[in-house]
Image (cartoon, helix red, strand yellow):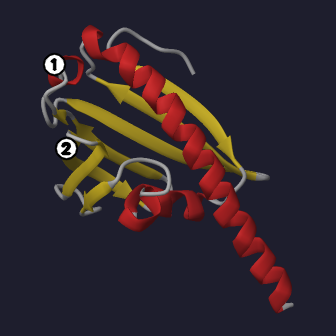
């Protein structure tokens, strides 16, 4: 996807079902496999969204939408001493993630909007990095579920 002023957009394919991918977006234990070390998630509109992405850098906001297994949205901003991140206070931006079932898996679309220009580049780079991790771990989880189903037959 393209990047717009004030927004970062990414689109990836994940070889796993939307249900599998969705769980990696709302379950703290699963999220820990692709982003952050500490998570406090209350996946409901108005619920807490908090991730310690790296030591001393906490992304904080609230869930604005949780529609299993198709869409998650949350506000995002930083509690951080890093001046590059501190320009984006908690809840100041919006992350929207859409999951679309395709024949062999899921197409994930991420849009992170309301970003100040000073924070756009680091978010562009880090979302690419973290989504690659999600792509790997969700595929592995989905493959494991498929193998278990085949073994049950």
> Which residue is found at the position 28% from the left and 33% from the top?
94
Number of numbered markers: 2
> Quick check: 2 above or below 62?
above
Q: Which mark is residue 60?
A: 2
User: Helix or strand or loop: what does disc 2 sit on?
Assistant: strand
Residue 85 lies left or right of residue 68; in this view the side is: left
Residue 87 percent location from the top left of the image: 16, 19
* Quadrant position of the N terminus in the picture: top right
The percent coordinates of residue 99 (x first, y second) are 55, 48
N-terminal-most mark, 1 or 2: 2
- Residue 35 % position (x, y): 42, 47
> In this view of the protein, can residue 108 be seen by the observer?
no
The residue depicted at 34 percent of the width and 16 percent of the height is: 120
Which residue is more in the foreground, 47 or 60? 60
Residue 130 shown left or right of residue 49 in the figure: right
Query: Which quadrant of the figure has residue 85?
Result: top left
Q: Along the horizontal axis of the image, is 124 left or right of 64?
A: right
Q: Quadrant of residue 7?
A: top left
């Amino acid at each position: 996807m393209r990047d717009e002023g004030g927004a970062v957009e990414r689109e990836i394919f994940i070889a796993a079902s939307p249900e599998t991918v969705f769980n990696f977006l709302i379950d703290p234990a699963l999220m820990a496999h692709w982003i952050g070390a500490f998570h406090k998630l209350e996946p409901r509109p108005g619920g807490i969204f908090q991730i310690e992405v790296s030591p001393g850098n906490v992304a904080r906001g609230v869930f604005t939408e949780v529609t299993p297994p198709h869409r998650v949205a949350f506000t995002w901003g930083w509690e951080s001493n890093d001046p590059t991140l501190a320009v984006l206070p908690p809840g100041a931006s919006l992350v929207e993630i859409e999951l679309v079932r395709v024949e062999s898996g899921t197409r994930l679309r991420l849009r992170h909007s309301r970003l100040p220009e000073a924070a756009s580049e680091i978010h562009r780079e880090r979302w690419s990095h973290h989504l690659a991790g999600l792509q790997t771990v969700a595929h592995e989880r989905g493959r494991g579920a498929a193998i278990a189903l085949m073994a049950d037959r």
